[in-house]
């Protein structure tokens, strides 16, 4: 029985892989104008057929509600006319961005007369595994399509009907533009074994990007044989150095912690230089408590902020995604850097200081995708960086680090032209 | 028992990981001058202590010979004074190359006043798994060290004493320069379970590069949770288009097939346009047979070259690394491209043609790291590309593709400077 099932799964995924490969070949030669026209057509179709999308979404929503899904997740799953409009606007925005494909990144001649060009090309086929957020379906398609990649999507099972409808509407739009509709493919089998097998579809998929919580990402890293880009876990720190500008400190910390709590670039842990601790802690404590932030601190912190509770070592390694902040007093910049490099997730960390040398040391030695001086960690974002789009925030060092826009969805190839050269 | 062993392996690898992490922090801030001085000192030490290296190598060699190792592998294992000199020269050459670390790759200002710099930084800790070639030990160290990376090496067990001696000599040289000797670490436990556990040492190792045969690479891809760069399998094609320059065709094919047969950029498969087949095949057959190349071909090939044997479908997917060549006649450029994209390994493929449009189509549509017009595939090489060094040839699309020099051993980080910016 198990074996029959494995064969069925394998046949299903191989058929998807073959479709994606065929679409990939067509996509890599599409000119920018046609890609933008198709994105516009897909955007219009989503708005035009929003009734169909909302109907499908209602089926998902009702099922999820009955199954007792939490309010926050239900809200992420929900489609409204406004949200469909936002998906369409996202596609229009991607259409307006420059096309990175075909850019000659470098060109050089060798003494033997060979002319070598390093040319930006699509990855080929991207796989995206995500949770029950239907907007990711349109968004991931738009980014992959603009960069000439076919995409195979595995969305959360709770958004199944919504995703199916979105993919159908976009596929129809592509067909109307004379483009292979298999540029967007959805895995319609929600068996967990299918998802795991998908992570090993190495002969068809060039890159796999998980978008979701820590559990999903861990599962992909452990199971995938396809190269993975890890995204989105952020245990972000702010270090308040002894020369920090007192005026700017509180607004930055409050912004980084509370402006939006469920996001990967929110601040989760605060380090304070001992020489400024007794001056800053009371003011900061008051501001954080006013925002309903629970403070988990060491002894000095609790002395200055009586409402603070004791922090455990686990606290320093926790991405709360909640109104909770761990706070620790450190003896030196060195201790701050070493604490951050031990506990951070390589996402975003900031120093608040007026000392140039300390700022430079922090920028150099903290091992994170984005390192800040005197600004909120909340700016780690493709739009805030001016990329005009974002597929995720990479927390690994291979290929892409930090906010990933269109360029980060491309690879390159070397095109070498000769006139008969052989190697001596 | 098993459990005790697992705990021991884990403790051993964690201790190596911690050492590498400490070295990494020191390495990332080393200035170029000191790195070059240390590389020079290491090169000198290898030459000075070559007696010690040859002695250690004799132990490996004797053991391997007794165990019945094949001649070709024994030759790869063998160290001589000349080979030690070559290792040292390799390190000197790396010292002479520009240091990519610290390069500001991009710098831009945002409307809110944030200044963002994208700065090239070391990966951190690199892991290299390779076979019984002691020269890789010095070579991989040199490339990683110059780019500010600590390296953990797992060499083939047959080269154990040689690697141990090389690492000791280099480590001593680093110590003399006041640099953490743990910049180069060798896994000294040759248990297979240790190698597999090393592939999962994700909290300490930023990138894992296997250097060796297809079996080693497959094992790393299947087991690793660390991001991997796949290198070195090359089922390389040459397509002889109908307008190919007859004068240049034979020398290119002979060069690509026979100049060195055991290398990944050697040609393994030849495609010939049907309109030129009866003219080129007899000449080509004669030249290949003179070089003792076994030809495995389709029916047309065998008609024109009676000595050719029949090719099976497996032949077209085989990287022979031997004096064997598969040959197939195709109806069109399209068939050639589609055959290549089906059977190649994404390494190097060439078209011989005088038709500009066909050349462009081939360059665009063949999905390989290096795509050639009118030149031998043997040029896919870091030195031939002018990189001055090479850690391997990447056949994946993530991070690096094709020959990998120093830059490909780096990552980047964003350094963001503000004056109190918060996100609205």
Image (tube, coloured by chain):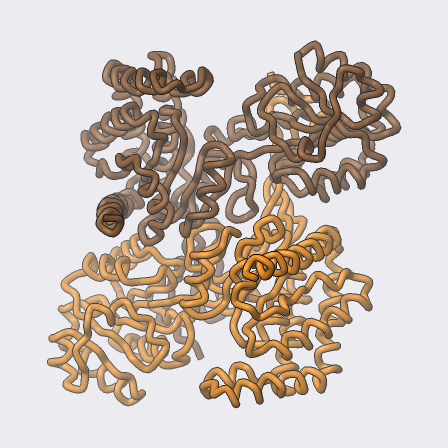
Chain colours: A brown, B orange
Residue A363 vs A266, above or below: the answer is below
Tell which of A339 and A8 is nearer to you: A8
- In the picture, measured across the screen, residue A374 lies left or right of residue A167, that is right
The image quarter containing residue A406 is top left
Q: Position of residue B229 (x, y in %)?
A: 48, 57
Instruction: Give me the residue at 18% from left, 81% from top.
Output: B309
Q: Where's residue B314, x and y in %?
A: 24, 69
The residue that appears at 72% across and 51% down in the rendered structure is B25
Count the marks.
0
Q: Kindly indicate the quadrant of the structure image that contains residue A93.
A: top left
The x, y position of residue A217, in whole percent, is 48, 39
For the point 41% across and 54% down, which residue is it?
A: A413
Relative to the observer, which residue lies in front, A256 or B361?
Answer: A256
Q: Quadrant of the N terminus of chain B?
A: bottom right
Work out whether residue B248 or residue B179 is closer to the camera in this orientation and state it: B179
Residue A143 appears in the rendering: yes
Which residue of the protein is positioned furthest toward the top in this rendering? A290
Quarter of the image holding residue A238?
A: top right
Up the image or down, B100 lies above or below A252; here it is below
- Quarter of the figure with the C terminus of chain B: top right
Residue B20 percent across, percent down from the top left: 68, 56
Residue B63 lies left or right of residue A54; in this view the side is: right
Identified at 51% across, 47% down, the residue is A399
Position of residue B350 relative to residue B14, above or below, is: below
In the orientation shown, which residue stands out farthest toward the front?
Answer: B1
| Residue B98 visible in the picture | no
> On the picture, is A41 further left or further right than B215?
left
């Amino acid at each position: 029985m198990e074996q029959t099932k494995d064969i069925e799964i394998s046949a299903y995924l191989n058929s998807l892989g073959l479709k994606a490969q065929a679409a990939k070949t067509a996509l890599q030669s599409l000119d920018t104008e046609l890609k933008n026209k198709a994105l516009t057509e897909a955007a219009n179709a989503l708005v035009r057929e929003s009734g169909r999308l909302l109907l499908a979404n209602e089926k998902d929503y009702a099922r999820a509600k009955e199954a007792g899904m939490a309010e926050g997740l239900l809200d992420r799953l929900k489609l409204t006319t406004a949200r469909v409009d936002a998906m369409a606007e996202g596609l229009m925005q991607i259409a307006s961005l420059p096309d990175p494909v075909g850019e000659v990144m470098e060109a050089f001649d060798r003494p033997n007369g060979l002319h070598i060009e390093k040319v930006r090309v699509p990855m080929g086929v991207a796989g995206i595994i995500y949770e029950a957020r239907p907007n990711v379906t349109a968004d991931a398609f738009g980014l992959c399509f603009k960069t000439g990649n076919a995409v195979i999507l595995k969305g959360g099972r709770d958004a199944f009907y919504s995703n199916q409808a979105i993919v159908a509407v976009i596929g129809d739009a592509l067909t109307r533009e004379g483009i292979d509709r298999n540029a967007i493919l959805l895995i319609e089998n929600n068996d967990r074994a299918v998802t795991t097998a998908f992570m090993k579809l190495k002969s068809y998929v060039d890159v796999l990007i998980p978008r979701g919580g820590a559990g999903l990402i861990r599962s992909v890293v452990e199971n995938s044989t396809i190269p993975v880009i890890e995204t989105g876990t952020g245990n972000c720190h702010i270090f308040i150095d002894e020369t920090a500008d007192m005026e700017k400190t509180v607004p930055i910390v409050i912004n980084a912690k509370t402006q939006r709590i469920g996001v990967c670039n929110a601040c989760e842990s605060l380090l304070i230089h001992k020489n400024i601790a007794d001056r800053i802690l009371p003011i900061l404590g008051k501001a954080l408590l006013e925002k309903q932030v629970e403070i988990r601190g060491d002894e000095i912190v609790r002395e200055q902020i009586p409402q603070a509770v004791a922090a455990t070592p686990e606290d320093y390694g926790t991405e709360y995604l909640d109104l909770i902040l761990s706070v620790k007093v450190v003896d030196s910049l060195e201790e701050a850097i070493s604490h951050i490099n031990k506990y951070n997730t390589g996402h975003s960390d900031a120093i608040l200081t007026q000392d140039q040398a300390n700022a430079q040391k922090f920028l150099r030695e903290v091992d994170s995708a984005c390192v800040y001086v005197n600004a909120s960690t909340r700016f780690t974002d493709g739009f805030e960086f001016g990329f005009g789009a974002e597929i995720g925030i990479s927390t690994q060092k291979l290929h892409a680090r930090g906010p990933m826009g269109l360029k980060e969805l491309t690879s390159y190839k070397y095109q070498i032209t000769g006139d008969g050269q052989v190697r001596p």
